Image (cartoon, helix red, strand yellow):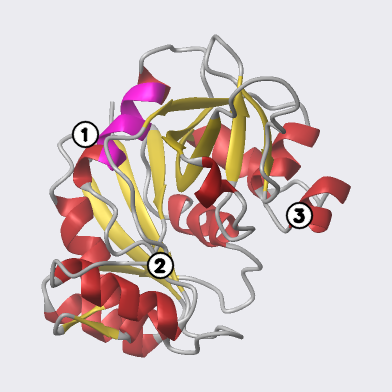
Amino acid sequence: MTIVGVIPARYASVRFPGKPLAPLAGKPMVVRVWEAAKEAGRIDRVLVATDDERIAAAVRDVGGEVVLTSPDAPSGTDRLAEAARKIPADVYVNIQGDEPLMSPANIDAAVETLVGDLQREIATIALSIPASEAVDPNVVKVAVAKDGRALYFSRAGIPYPRNGQPAHRKHLGIYAYRAATLQRLAALPPSPLEQLESLEQLRWLEAGYTIWVGEAADDSIGVDTPEDLEKAERYLRKEPVS
């Protein structure tokens, strides 16, 4: 079985233009993601999928592999699917380019959740968080069935603790897909719940796909804004992160 990790990276961003090239502790953020992915034990090959030559040059400068994709790709999944059509594999792992602190162990956890059962088509990871963190709409939560199936993803603090203590699970945005499933997902049209919450994985649930949720090894800090980048810098300096 061949497993390829793909890091989708685009230069354009409404909130943070040029984000993949933003320096984090002396290295472009996309390079830090690539370095972490290279350390994952379950990944056979790592590449960056981008439409921007500046990003491509930064990756190539450190010996990384790049696949150039269309500037018209509407999402990371579409960019991943385009790269997959050029690079054959059995399983593809979508490693978010704005997760520079994502650990190799988390990447392996997503892969193991998928390949542990031949019937599984999509896998991701999550971890428990306190109620104080669950109120943040930028932290995506997932409700999970006893057998590990994702029931719903939301920016709201699900499940609502009407009775008893809350049991919130933070979703970490890394996905592993079977090759054929990835191409089918990329062909799906946007769905109502996806558009309402701005969460692409809801499109897959609405289309009837099952997403299996594994246990994350540790937390990560997603970088959507320059303020998030500063948080990541403080984390690497072992300073308090609020």
Left or right of 156? Residue 20 is: left
Where disc 3 sits, the SS reads helix
Q: 14 or 216, which is in the foreground?
A: 216
Q: What amino acid type is highlighted by mark number 2?
A: Asp
Q: CA distance from mark 1 to mark 3?
A: 32 Å
Q: Which residues are magenta?
A: 106-113
* Residue annotated with mark 2: 98
Where disc 1 sits, the SS reads loop
Instruction: State the image coordinates of residue 181 (x, y, percent, origin top left).
Output: 58, 33
* Residue annotated with mark 1: 42
* Residue annotated with mark 3: 197
| Upstream in sequence: badge 3 or badge 2 | 2
> In the rendered image of this protein, does residue 193 appear above or below residue 145?
below
Q: CA distance from mark 2 to mark 1?
A: 21 Å
Residue 56, by quadrant, is bottom left
Instruction: State the image coordinates of residue 26 (x, y, percent, origin top left).
Output: 14, 84
Instruction: State the image coordinates of residue 145 (x, y, percent, origin top left).
Output: 61, 16
Q: CA distance from mark 3 to mark 2?
A: 19 Å
Q: Callout 1: 10 Å neighbours few (<14), some, many (20+)?
A: many
